[in-house]
Image (cartoon, rainbow, N blue to C red):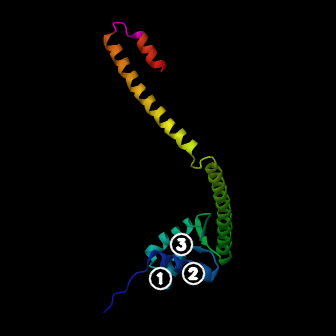
Amino acid sequence: MSKKRGLSLDEKREKMLQIFYDSQDFFLLKELEKLGPKKGVISQSVKDVVQTLVDDDLVFKDKIGTSVYFWSLPSCAGNQLRSIQRKLDSDLQSSKRRYTELIDQCNSLKKGRENSDEREEALDELKTIEQKYNELKVESHIFMRDAFLFNPNPLPLVILAFER
């Protein structure tokens, strides 16, 4: 004997959306809770399923007086899909433009960086200068620390240290 399997959330959403598309009418939540079981959606989950459809803008909801009406028309879904497609197309075009701009920028930056003897020498010189700078910086900190330790009036040294 096989047990009856419940519907997944996506299947419930499809079934509830089909109710709206088939009738093309306006519904109260109570009416949907009665129609849901006919499509295989248990009445306890109808409210949650409809709310997810409302959150995704597949079903519209309006409060008129004390009643809350739900509706969805196939033409509305088509319009939404077309607007989403237009947005995605424009995003794609802007991404393609940005990509070509970045490729051009990359190529223009590469022009001055071809491997040559002059460039290699300049890079080596830059490395040695940076290395010497770091060594002098460490040495300067050592001298500054020693000056603080042996100077009875360190205020001028503090000012000098902050100026660096």
Q: Position of residue 127 (x, y in %)?
A: 47, 37
Give the label, 1 or 3, closer to the camera: 1
Asked if the residue under mark 3 is in contact with the one under mark 2, i.e. CB atoms within 8 Å, the reply is: no
Q: Residue at x 42, y 30 (%)?
A: 134
Kind of residue indicated by mark 2: Gln
- Mark 3 Cα-neighbour bin, 10 Å: few <14, some 14–19, many ≥20: some
- Mark 2 Cα-neighbour bin, 10 Å: few <14, some 14–19, many ≥20: some
- Tag 2's secondary structure? helix
Q: Residue at x 43, y 18 (%)?
A: 161
Can you identify the residue that label 2 sits on? 18
Q: Is residue 125 magenta?
A: no
Whichever of callouts 2 and 1 sits on the residue coming sooner in the sequence is 2
Give the label, 2 or 1, closer to the camera: 2
Q: How many marks?
A: 3
For residue 63, what is the image quadrant?
bottom right
Q: Position of residue 130 (x, y in %)?
A: 47, 33
Q: Which residues are magenta?
A: 151-155
Give the label, 2 or 3, closer to the camera: 2
* Residue at the limit of the structure toward the top, as seen here: 152
Res 29 label? 3
- Mark 1 Cα-neighbour bin, 10 Å: few <14, some 14–19, many ≥20: some
Q: State the residue in front, 155 or 112.
A: 112
- Tag 1's secondary structure? helix
Whichever of callouts 2 and 3 sits on the residue coming sooner in the sequence is 2
User: Gap in Å between the C-alphas at discs 2 and 1?
Assistant: 13 Å
Q: What kind of secondary structure does the magenta stretch mostly adopt?
A: loop
Can you identify the residue that label 1 sits on? 37
